[in-house]
Image (cartoon, helix red, strand yellow):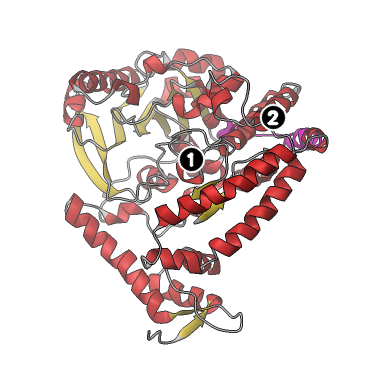
Amino acid sequence: MMTGELLTIAEASIWATEHTGKYVTPSNIAYLIQYGRIKKLGSNGATKVSKDHLRDYYTAYNQQRESSWKDQLGDDLNWVLSFDQYKEAETTKHVHRLHPYKGKFIPQLVEYFLDEHTDHFKSNACFKKGDIILDPFSGSGTTVVQASELGLHAIGLDISAFNTLIGTCKVNRYDISDVQCEIDRITVTLKQFLSTSPIPVFEQKLLQELSTFNRNYFPVPEYKYSLRQGEINEVEYGTAKEKEFLCIYHQLLHDYNIKLRQDKADRFIEKWFLHHIREEIDLVFAEIKKIDNIDTKKIVTLILSRTIRSCRATTHADLATLVEPVMSTYYCAKHGKICKPLFSILNWWETYTKDTLKRFLHFDTLRTDTFQTCITGDSRSIDICSVLRKKNPEFAALVQKQKVKGIFSSPPYVGLIDYHEQHAYAYDLFGFERHDELEIGPLFKGKGKEAKQSYIQGITDVLNNCKQVLSVDYDIFLVANDKYNMYPTIATQAGMQIVNQFKRPVLNRTEKDKGAYAEIIFHLKEK
């Protein structure tokens, strides 16, 4: 095989950056090698790649994608709004990644419509510094956070108490030294607990056995490259090796007397966590309850939630959509080797505590001195000013005087997500009151005619209720994949008109779904 000029990983990083027009790190090149996207070359331990292979990869991936998506979704697709020039670290910048959340939009999309710039597509800037923005479906608080960056005041409303906690934690200001002190105290307690447990020694031995087994049967990057070339039947080979390693795994469980399942499996937190994981969760939560500072308690609670989400008994490929609890070693299609469940929360706890503090320090350099408030309530009926007066009288007075200039929000999609259920572990552990029955367009209600009619009425009621705080010349931007063509009806029923719409490609929606997909940003004004 002719490979042309060979490049080191560092040289490939420089070449790819120039070729693509965006920064490609050496780690990105190493990822392509590890996962078989390009072939590993070189000799004497010096890893190299072919410039021709790289060029072919980026040509196929980048140049063809836009054309392919437009063929599938239409020529009116606005690729500028794909924001594909941004790396994941930029689309999950600072506090935006404090906690996972299904269905959230990237901050660059919010910024594009809220800031004061204009371009070929956005001919008018609707908002300026000092304006007030409302998000009646605030979810994890992306709009509220970006408003703070841009010098705008913002109110976030959500029916889910846990969603409100996420948004509140993102915009709160903290005594960082107090947060660090409490984290250190809890970490010491957790480590002391583990020092009396068989788990650390068991897991160390398990990792040794896995390393040897995977090195023999799933060598990197040769195995992944062979898969991509069709030289190995992944299902047959992976299943056979999975069964082979299970004998080793079961023997270790016996040797170290490891209990896998909890005594009950009635609730989410009982079904989806191993016995030892649950013990550590309960230990840390008991320590959190001892924290006096309410803001510190909230953010440490959110860190625990983020931690336990990563410790659910599932495969790496099923983190976004759970299938069945997995409490044994398994062949992992995502990583191309035998993987294991987690037996302790310690590593993720320490990772997320450090990451959270770093993100807050970063956000503190960007946030502005503006009002940001997240409220739990039904956006169809909540008296916004009345509730706001109880939480922040000064902000409520500003809203009363100045009014809300507009809305930027992503309403739920009909029959797609159960917004309470995605955080069921947190509701079980922390005791938040659930209001699943008040969700608009939840998955459990389906996508039938009745569900669609209910959805239209629900979104209409939200828009009408929000008028109590909107200024006369308001601007509303709603992000939706309106494949059922419901938003023209919603706009009419709310006494509004759609004055513009922007169709954007949505890249990498979930861990599994990479297919062509678009959503519309509807711009509504008073009719």
The residue mark sitting in front, 1 or 2, is 1
Q: Position of residue 173 (x, y in %)?
A: 64, 34
Report helix, strand or loop for mark 2.
Answer: helix
Q: For this view, does 360 lie left or right of residue 82? A: right
Residue 311, picture quadrant: top right
Report helix, strand or loop for mark 1.
Answer: loop
Mark 2 neighbour class, 10 Å CA radius: few under 14, some 14 to 19, many 20 or more: many
Residue at 73%, 26% (x, y): give it.
283
Q: Could you say which is closer to the camera, residue 208 or residue 319?
A: 208
The span picked out in magenta is 169-188
Q: Please indicate, yes or no, whether residue 217 appears anywhere in the rendered image.
A: yes
Q: Which residue is mark 2?
A: 296
Q: For this view, does 215 lie left or right of residue 35? A: right
Q: Could you say which is closer to the camera, residue 387 or residue 380?
A: 380
Q: Which residue is mark 1?
A: 319
Q: Position of residue 1 (x, y in %)?
A: 38, 84
Q: Could you say which is closer to the camera, residue 79 or residue 373?
A: 79
Total numbered labels:
2
Q: Position of residue 351 (x, y in %)?
A: 66, 45
Q: For this view, does 310 lie left or right of residue 207? A: left
Q: Could you say which is closer to the camera, residue 327 or residue 388?
A: 327
Residue 464, picture quadrant: top left
Q: Which mark is residue 346?
A: none
Residue at 67%, 51% (x, y): give it.
207
Marks 1 and 2, how far apart at CA = 28 Å
Q: Is residue 240 above or below residue 147?
A: below
Q: Position of residue 271 (x, y in %)?
A: 54, 25
